[in-house]
Amino acid sequence: MPASPAAVDIASLFMTRELLLGRGLAVLAAWVLLNLVGSGYYLAHSDRRHESFYFHGMNVGWGLVNAGLAAWGILQLHFVAPAGLVPAELLQSQLFNENLFLLNAGLDVAYIMTGYYLRARALVPGQALPVRLLGFGRSLWVQGGFLLVFDATMWSLLHWLGRDWFRLLG
């Protein structure tokens, strides 16, 4: 017996969202690779007395954290729509994903602002290890900036995709 048109629409929208999330996680994984390989190389060739050592060290740390998040996200992806999926469940998971990226975007702004704070603290006379604060602050700018663009883009794409979902609940 063929599936009803509503069931096909629900499964199609579900899989479209999973594809979007998968592509976003692929972008995050590429960022992870860039950080681990690029900053890993420069960290190994940097002097601890310079800002670049702390910048690349922090980037490697961010790369490890983001690798864990990307791996977790990839493991959460579904390659087949669950049987019996109803529009209310679809909408609930859609709103969860949108809110997650929106929350992360807010955290990204906090990372960027913390980078400014650390760099300002480094300029205080007598500050212990100002190069560390400068390097960590610059890393927070770069990581927070990338993640802000990433999370805002993912939220926007998910939100745009979700506009079709209300039609199913109609």
Image (cartoon, rainbow, N blue to C red):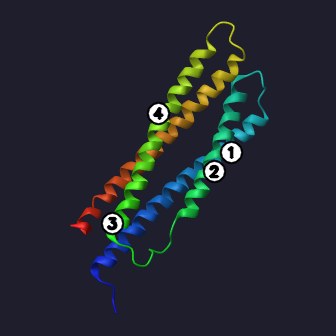
Q: In the image, is residue 100 above or below residue 11?
A: above
From the image, tell me which residue sits under label 2.
Answer: 67
- Report if residue 75 is visible in the image: yes
Residue drawn where x is 56% and y is 37% of the image: 143
Residue type at mark 1 is Leu
Residue drawn where x is 59% and y is 57% of the image: 72
Please tell me which of labels 1 and 4 falls first in the chain: 1
* Horizontal and vertical percent position of residue 105: 45, 40
**Distance from label 1 to label 3 (Cα)?**
40 Å
From the image, tell me which residue sits under label 3.
Answer: 88
Residue type at mark 2 is Ala
From the image, tell me which residue sits under label 1.
Answer: 36
1 vs 4, front mark: 4
Do the CB atoms of the residues marked 2 and 4 lie less than 8 Å apart? no
* Horizontal and vertical percent position of residue 113: 50, 26
Residue type at mark 3 is Ala
Q: In the image, is residue 122 above or below residue 164?
A: above
Q: Identify the element where label 2 is drawn.
A: helix
From the image, tell me which residue sits under label 4.
Answer: 109
Categorize mark 4 by other alpha carbons within 10 Å: few (<14), some (14-19), many (20+): some
Residue type at mark 4 is Val
3 vs 4, front mark: 3
**Distance from label 2 to label 4 (Cα)?**
20 Å
The image quadrant that residue 89 belongs to is bottom left
**Distance from label 1 to label 2 (Cα)?**
9 Å
Q: Residue furthest left?
A: 170
**Distance from label 3 to label 4 (Cα)?**
32 Å
Please tell me which of labels 2 and 4 falls first in the chain: 2
Residue drawn where x is 55% and y is 50% of the image: 28
Q: In the image, is residue 43 above or below residue 132?
A: below
1 vs 3, front mark: 3
Do the CB atoms of the residues marked 1 and 2 lie less than 8 Å apart? yes
